[in-house]
Image: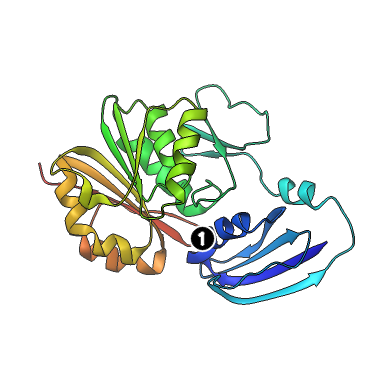
């Protein structure tokens, strides 16, 4: 068994996980994550091309034969998020406790498994923001997890977009298999009509959130809420500055999410 040890920026972890699945890994474990730097371990049948990965350091080694798929899967534990959600690995038959909404974590070709603290913060903010019948935009949908969460919370219309053309078919297939009514397209918030959505969920980078601030404002209905997530706590001041201070930030494991409400 070939094992790849990777050290990377914590902000790049979801992207690297998605890339490793696309390149055929049998499983991935998180060794450490301090909010700034993450260490991952991926298992392959043979040494594989890893060019283009945004890693700080990466090294191959050969390990004794073990059931590495079981080892990797054992790292994925079910977890309660906020007061409404219960995340479980897709291979687990575990049901959600009474009163919680079951969401599956699905490693695959797109980001947004639910494993990462930033995604969990976005889910927590989402449950506080989505009201029955709301129109919701999942900006940078990745695997479609936040779209599914919004639909389960009672959103009337859910739009999912991503600039990665490989992510959108993944999200669409997941919507189909989980019987979720959501529309997915390749593109960004600039394709959304003015004052269309009540909630924008954007679990992306601080740089992207800042650059898209004007378009996010334009797409929101008066009084609508933008859930800004996907960045470490160190970037919180710059994101706040782009959104008039925002609301009360949520923080977890060195990551932050910031709600911002559009003027009524």
How many numbered circles are shown? 1
Instruction: Measuring from the top left, give residue 242's x and y in whole percent.
Output: 21, 63
Disc 1 packing (10 Å; few <14; some 14–19; many ≥20):
some
Q: Residue furthest top?
A: 98
Is 53 in front, or is 221? 53
Q: Nearer the viewer, residue 182 or 232?
A: 182
Residue depicted at 26% across the width and 40% down the height: 199
Q: Position of residue 246 (x, y in %)?
A: 24, 55
Residue at figure coordinates x 24%, y 59% from the top left: 212
| Left or right: 183 as drawn, with respect to 49 | left
Q: Which image quarter holds the C terminus?
A: top left
Q: Secondary structure at mark 1?
A: helix
Residue 66 pos. (x, y %): 87, 54
Residue 70 at x, y percent in the picture: 78, 46
Q: Quadrant of residue 98?
A: top right
User: Which residue is situated farthest in the bottom direction here?
Assistant: 57
Between 245 and 51, the one lying in front of the other is: 51
**Image-quadrant location for residue 237:** bottom left
Query: 225 left or right of 86?
Result: left
Residue at 35% x, 25% y: name it: 154
Is 181 drawn above or below residue 90 in the view shown? Answer: above
Residue drawn at point x = 49 percent, y = 43 percent: 170
Vertical position of residue 135 compared to residue 206: above or below: above
Tag 1 residue: 15
Specify the quadrant that holds the N terminus: bottom right
């Amino acid at each position: 068994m070939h094992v790849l040890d990777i050290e990377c920026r914590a902000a790049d972890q979801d992207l690297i996980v998605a890339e490793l699945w696309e390149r055929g890994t049998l499983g991935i474990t998180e060794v450490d994550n301090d909010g700034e730097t993450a260490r991952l371990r991926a298992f392959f049948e043979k040494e594989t091309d890893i060019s283009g990965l945004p890693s700080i350091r990466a090294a191959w080694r050969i390990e004794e034969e073990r059931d590495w798929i079981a080892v990797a899967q054992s790292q994925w534990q079910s977890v309660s998020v906020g007061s409404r959600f219960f995340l479980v690995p897709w291979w687990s038959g575990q049901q959600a406790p009474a009163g919680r909404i079951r969401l599956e974590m699905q490693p695959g070709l797109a980001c947004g498994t639910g494993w990462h603290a930033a995604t969990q913060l976005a889910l927590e903010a989402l449950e506080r923001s989505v009201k029955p019948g709301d129109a919701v935009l999942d900006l940078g949908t990745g695997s479609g997890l936040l779209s599914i969460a919004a639909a389960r919370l009672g959103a009337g219309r859910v739009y999912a977009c991503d600039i990665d053309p490989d992510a959108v078919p993944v999200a669409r297939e997941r919507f189909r298999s989980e019987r979720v009514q959501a529309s997915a397209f390749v593109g960004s918030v600039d394709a959304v009509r003015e004052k269309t959505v009540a909630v924008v969920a954007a679990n992306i980078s601080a740089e992207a959130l800042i650059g898209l601030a004007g378009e996010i404002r334009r797409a929101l209905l008066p009084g609508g809420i933008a859930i800004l997530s996907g960045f470490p706590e160190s970037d919180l001041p710059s994101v706040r500055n782009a959104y008039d201070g925002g609301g009360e930030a949520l923080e977890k494991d060195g990551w932050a999410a910031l709600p911002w409400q559009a003027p009524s």
